[in-house]
Image: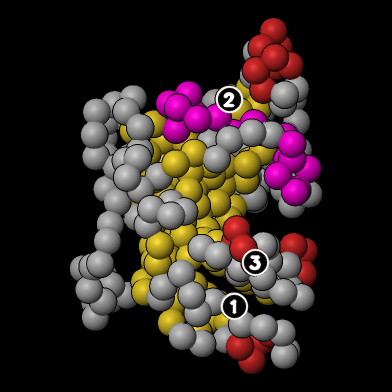
Amino acid sequence: MSDLVRGWSLAWSEEFDGAAGGPADPRTWRAETGGGGWGNAELQYYTGGSENAFLDGASNLAVVVRRTEPRLREDRYGGCVYTSARLISKDRVALRYGLVQARIQVPDGRGIWPGFWMLGQDIGTTGWPQCGEIDVMEILGHDPAVVHATVHGPGYSGSAGVTASHRARASLAAGFHVYSVAWEPGRIRWFLDDQLYATVTPGDLRGRPWVFDHDFYLLINVAVGGTFPGNPDTSLAFPRTMLIDYI
């Protein structure tokens, strides 16, 4: 047991056990699907089913980015050059405070943008960013040694999010790492492999609303291209895979 985990009690976990090719537990996860850029000029089409998200039979969830076949691109994927997956726990598993962590091996490559994050459960009524967003982990594939931690809320969303970055000693795509937030009333702390590297409190928001004291749900995805990571170049080989060992 790590020093970070000691002192917390387990309330819920996801181990991604099951036969190879099977789906993530539908009692927890559902797929959000479609293209259209997702607000960031992204290039992927998120699919349902097991095309881009499936259990690998070794207690991991695989989220796989593929290049679409040109003959299917317009009819099936709205013209998107890539497919990927975005799984959410909305209305199935919600959290309010706690130590939230996942052991993940991220993919690398220019334009590849894996993330593990949370959104306010009330997004359907309040909208974004009023619902709040906590990004536990984002990686930009062209610089995979750096992990990014961000919160978004009213007056500090998108490129104005309150953010911090931490550079590891080597590429985080070379193996599994544990990404965590310790989320408490009035404080959120980020850890990479139990090392604290960022903290946000209401005082860091300069009078803007703190919107992190209600239920949030989980998201796992790998985006491709867009305003934050830039787009892949033609030399990048596909598929690219993110593996999630546990949450």
Q: To which quarter of the image does residue 62 belong?
A: top left
Find residue 211 and name its label. Answer: 1
User: How is the structure coloured here?
Assistant: secondary structure
Q: Residue at x 51, y 87 (%)?
A: 186
Residue 223 visible, this angle: yes
Amino acid at dot 3: Thr
Please tell me whether mark 3 sits on a helix, a strand or a loop.
helix
Q: Which residues are magenta?
A: 36-53
Residue at left 24%, top 28%? Answer: 19
- In the figure, is residue 58 to the left or right of 195? left
Relative placement, left or right, of 87 versus 40 is left
Q: Which residue is mark 2?
A: 66
Which residue is drawn at the image coordinates 63% and 41% (left, top)?
Answer: 223
| SS for callout 1 | loop
State the image quarter where residue 205 is shown: bottom right
Rendered location of residue 105, percent (x, y): 43, 46
Which is more toward the observer, 233 or 183?
Answer: 183
Which of discs 1 and 2 lies nearer the camera? The answer is 1
- Say which mark, if any, is on residue 39: none
Q: Which residue is mark 3?
A: 126
Q: Quadrant of the C terminus?
A: bottom left
* Real-space CA distance between mark 1 and mark 3, rounded to the nearest whole angstrom: 11 Å
Q: Secondary structure at mark 2?
A: strand
> Is 163 placed above or below 205 here?
above
Measured as percent of width and height from the top left, residue 192 is found at: 45, 65
Residue 170 visible to the viewer: no
Q: Is residue 74 above or below residue 229?
A: above
Q: Judge depth for marks 3 and 2 and give the one in front.
A: 3
Tell me the chief SS of the magenta region: loop
